[in-house]
Amino acid sequence: MAIRHIIYYPDPVLLKKADTVSGFNAELNNIFDDMVETMFAAKGVGLAAPQIGISMRIAVIDADIENRGSRILRLVNPVIIEAKGKISWREGCLSIPGLDLDVERRERVVMEALNENGDTIREEASGFLAIAIQHEIDHLDGTLILERVSALKRNFYRKKIMKHGLPLVMDEQDRGSQERTQLRG
Ligand code: CO
C-alpha cells in the first residue's frame, strides 16, 4: 500500500469523464488499497481515482466520521438510480485545497455500483453519505464543485486560483459558518 500524490485543479485528468472499469483483478485491489490510504492521510471522506491521476470509474468513501474506517465503500462504476429532495452543504475538495463552497445536492439517493470483486452493491443514502456519493460520482464525470455554483462564483474563484495557486486562502466572509460537518472528498 502506498499514499498517492493527489492531483490538483486544473489538471486535465480532473476535468474529463473517467473510463468504465471492466477488469476485476489484483491491480484494481491495489488501486483501492492506495486510495483508501491516501483518503485517510488527506483526512478526506471520499476520493475518486482521477484525483490520483487514474481516469477510471473508481471511488472510495468513508462517511462515518465518528467511526472512521468502520464502513469503507469501495465503488466501481457507481451510478445514481434514484434521487429525491434538495439539500445545501458546505463542501471542500482534496483537489482544490482551501476552497469551501455551498453546493446544492439531492438529499436522498439510491446508488448502484460494483464492489472490488465485481458484485453488485446498492446503497440507499441520505444527508452526509448521499452528498459524499454525489461528490465522488461528479469526479468520475469530470465535474468539480466549482461547476456546481453560480458562474459568478466560479469565475471569481477560478481567477483567484490561477493568480495565487493552491491552496486557496479564502476571505473570512466567504468561509461561512461551520455548524455542520464539512465534507471534503
Ligand atoms: Co473532490
Image (cartoon, rainbow, N blue to C red):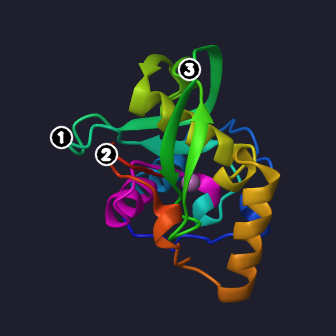
Q: Amino acid at mark 1?
A: Asn
Where's residue 68, x and y in %? Answer: 22, 45
The residue under the point 66% across, 48% down is 139
**Judging from the image, what secondary structure is the residue with disc 3 in?**
strand
Viewport quadrant of the N terminus = bottom left
* Circle 2 crowding by C-alpha within 10 Å: few under 14, some 14–19, many from 20: few
Circle 1 Cα neighbour tier, 10 Å, few/some/many (<14 / 14–19 / ≥20): few
How far across and down, in percent of the image, does residue 100 sit?
Answer: 52, 59
| Residue 33 drawn at (x, y percent) | 40, 53
Of the image marks 1 and 2, the number of the one nearer the N terminus: 1
Name the element at disc 2. loop
Cβ atoms under marks 3 and 1 closer than 8 Å: no
**What amino acid is found at the position of numbered circle 3 in the picture?**
Met
For mark 3, what is the residue? Answer: 111
Query: Which residue appears at 70% of the width and 48% of the height?
Result: 149
Image: 17 above or below 80: below
Compare marks 3 and 2 and give the one earlier in the sequence. Answer: 3
Specify start and end residues of the magenta stretch as a single range.
Answer: 34-50
Quarter of the image where ligand 1 sits: bottom right
Q: Name the one closer to the observer, 102 or 9.
A: 102
Relative to residue 47, is residue 58 drawn left or right?
A: right
Q: Few, some or many C-alpha atoms within 10 Å of disc 3 (few <14, some 14-19, many ≥20)?
A: many
According to the picture, the residue beneath numbered tag 1 turns out to be: 67
**86 left or right, relative to 16:** left
Residue located at (55% from left, 65% from top)? 99
- Is 56 left or right of 85, judged from the image as shown? right
Q: Residue 156 got which mark?
A: none
The span from disc 3 to disc 1 (Cα, nearest Å) is 22 Å
The residue singled out by tag 2 in the image is 179
Residue 69 visible somewhere in the drawing: yes
Identify the residue at the far bottom of this view.
164
